[in-house]
Amino acid sequence: MRPADTPGNDKPFLRSENGEDQLSAWRFRRAHRALFRGVYVSTETPVTLRLLGEAALLLAEPRSFLSHHTAARLWGGVVPDDADVHVTYPRMRAQCFGIAAHRPKARQHVVSWMGLPMTAPAQTFLDMSHLLGLVDVVVLGDSLVRKRRFTPDELVALAEHHRGPYSRLARRAARLVRAGVDSPMETRLRLLIVLAGLPEPEVDHRVYDEHGNVLFRYDLSYLQWRLIIEYDGRQHAESEEQWHQDINRDEQLDDWELRRLVVVAKDIHRTPGRTLTRIVRAMTRQGMPVPMLTDEWRRHFPTRESGISLPA
């Protein structure tokens, strides 16, 4: 048996079981868990994404780095769930179950973050444009802007020089990324509106008191037309404090004669057509000019309910 490389109880290490008797193997497995084939860590160590990334790199050849979904999540970005650890290798090489291998691209920007080599935030955004649809790429961009990994203008400038497959999608997604977005569902709501051909709303409008404190924050707004569109998550229904804050805000909006349209998760995921009908109706009632809707939203937000009237 090769001596275990154990830099610390909380570090993953490689271990060979060649020539090991059953009793020794049983004792070892009582105190350790396998992260990947041949890579172990103490059972007392919490398994985090960073730990899995470190473990995957132990199996990789030199100059390999974390990328794609794994890099995005380590930077604090929001991407669809993926159980694999994503690693880019200088040369493609078969790896064990649980590790997704990628080919390197020309001039990929790799940095050290959390002590691990991985693609830089903007590079990660560009790489993910090869794997995700437009809406999910913009969700990632908005979340990374919120984490202050880059600004929308910086991202657009980098995307303009991006070439290769899916570069057009990357450039378009970069131009749709905004600052001040509070959640992925806010991004989806805004894109439902924009991809339907409606005017883009203002994001994250804030109302301050005389001391500079934030009184209210509007997710999406057309203040010229006294219309606010907001996404309400479960915290609004489950938090009594939030519930009282919403009541006070709604009363203030009534005093200011502002129309507030509330959208929840199913309105976006299941009945986007009906949601657009509500939005168009609210715009019309506020006297806002409404253009003819385009059909692009249907590609990204499929309606999962039949027999409803969709906006023309």
Image (spheres, rainbow, N blue to C red):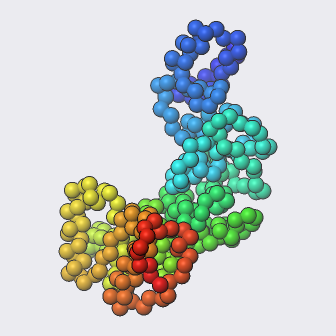
Pinpoint residue 218: horizontal percent, then vertical percent: 35, 72
> Which one is nearer the viewer's eye here, 275 or 15?
275
Q: Is residue 191 left or right of residue 239?
A: right
Pinpoint residue 154: horizontal percent, then vertical percent: 60, 67
Q: Is residue 301 left or right of residue 277?
A: right
> Which one is nearer the viewer's eye here, 179 or 33?
33
Determine if residue 186 is in view: no
Pinpoint residue 73: horizontal percent, then vertical percent: 54, 50
Instruction: Spot the residue most to the right.
Output: 91
Name the residue: 58% across, 31% down.
35
Name the residue: 48% across, 72% down.
192
Determine if residue 242 is in view: yes
> Which one is nearer the viewer's eye here, 294 or 212?
294
Instruction: Spot the residue most to the front.
Output: 307
Pinpoint residue 125: horizontal percent, then vertical percent: 61, 59
Q: Quadrant of the N terminus?
A: top right
Name the residue: 50% across, 83% down.
293
> Total label count?
0
200 up-or-down from 164: above or below: below
258 up-or-down from 23: above or below: below
Name the residue: 43% across, 70% down.
306
In which image quadrant can residue 310 be found? bottom left
